[in-house]
Amino acid sequence: MKVEMALSPGEAKPAGLSRSLVWLFAIASGMSVANVYYAQPLLDALAQDFAISQAAVGGVITATQAGCALALLFLVPLGDGMDRRRLMTIQLLALVAALVAVGMARTAPVLLAAMLAVGLLGTAMTQGLIAYAANAAAPHEQGRVVGAAQGGVFIGLLLARVFAGGVSDLAGWRGVYFFAAFLMLMIAIPLLRGLPATPAVNATLSYPRLLASMVTLLRQEKVLQVRGILALLMFAAFNIFWSALVLPLSAAPYHFSHTAIGAFGMVGVIGALAAARAGQWADRGLAQRTSAMALLALLLAWWPLSLMEMSLWALVIGIVLLDLGGQALHVTNQSLIFRTRIDAHSRLVGLYMLFYAVGSGLGAIGTTFIWAHFGWQGVCMLGAMVSLLALVFWWVTETPKRAER
């Protein structure tokens, strides 16, 4: 379905969200999602502290992603059926408690349960805020607002590794989660004061019916199906890289600190910022072209990444390409999906991100197993194969549309 966004020369745009509110959505979204990814540069420390093997320590990330999946199914859809500001308050306080629980964990089962809770609540906050932004934005600015919020998410995801690495070197991995809880309390005041009131669009739907309607949405919305599969493959490739990176860089010959490893996340911000306009490009009818370029960047990234053992500059180039492709594709996906049903933003983003959670979990499991048996080149080969599969899938699903034109 094509949406015309252009205005006639004499037509004035309707009032939209203030710049400060858009920034608030972006910052709060980035801080929320960061909680889900703090563990990635800490895997070796967690493995040592809880006596978990390198081949199995990916289960920590998998537990977090399981929480993500539960949130997308059972918490995020609530945004379509109740007051969003009240929902954000409850979830934020619960997230603070979950972060404290991770920092206090003394056994592996308690750690995994607390990580699951962080994934559950961090994801509910993040995706709830994106749906909130899409719902509050005027039609002419929806791509820009969603792109800004998603840009905050992507940068928060990347900077999570820098934050976790730096704080871990100073105060241990437990300090990462205690400090994260403090930061979430600090953002609570401006967030809960600044969020606009948006009445529930399906207040008459009961919770069971709200959840049941997600099955209908998934079955009926072809855009959601295609973009969901692309998200699954893209985030699998993304997590294959980031879950494995700490393992070679913390071993010989590098022996990098957590701060140094986390700093590589800063490189990805370049790619994320470069792709910040993907939502606006989608509004101008360039969604498929943007998707093609993003998927090509994702695939090409694995060549310089595979050369990391020869040059860290190759690693830097690969990270920029990987994050550029991932961010552009992700923003384009969401821009297209939000156009399909304006009364179902929370359920649509929940379903779409469910594909993401599955892909991330599979990537985390696959990469630690491949690393243990085939090393870094095996990891890069796996990532390249998944990225190629995403490009082929896009081509196959887009070809019938071109034939109809």
Image (cartoon, helix red, strand yellow):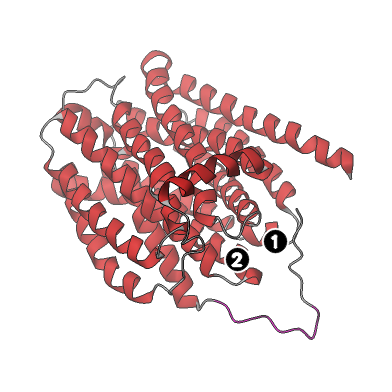
Which class describes the residues within 10 Å of circle 1: few (<14), some (14-19), or many (20+)?
many
| Dot 1 amino acid type | Asp
Q: Which disc, if any, is residue 142?
A: 2
Q: Find residue 161 and report its horizontal and vertical position in percent.
A: 34, 46
Residue 4, quarter of picture: bottom right
Question: In front: 203, or 264?
Answer: 203
Asked if residue 235 lies left or right of residue 191, the reply is right
User: Is any atom of residue 190 visible in this view?
Assistant: yes
Q: Residue 11 colored magenta?
A: yes
| Residues marked 2 and 1 touching at CB (< 8 Å) | yes
Which residue lies most toward the top here? 373
Q: Give the residue at x 59% y 42%.
A: 216
- Up-down relation of residue 303 to residue 343 (above or below): above
Q: Which residues are magenta?
A: 8-16
Asked if residue 137 lies left or right of residue 268, the reply is right
Q: Secondary structure at mark 2?
A: helix
N-term-proximal mark, 2 vs 1 = 2
Q: Give the residue at x 37% y 23%.
A: 368
Q: Which residue is mark 1?
A: 283
Residue 322, quarter of picture: top right
Q: Which disc, if any, is residue 12?
A: none
- Up-down relation of residue 266 to residue 299 (above or below): below
Question: In front: 338, or 176?
Answer: 338
Q: Residue 14 colored magenta?
A: yes
Q: Give the residue at x 53% y 44%.
A: 214
Question: In front: 56, or 347?
Answer: 347
Q: Find residue 99 and report its horizontal and vertical position in percent.
A: 21, 49
| Dot 2 amino acid type | Gln
User: Is any atom of residue 311 visible in this view?
Assistant: no
Q: Give the residue at x 61% y 63%.
A: 143
Residue 25, quarter of picture: bottom left
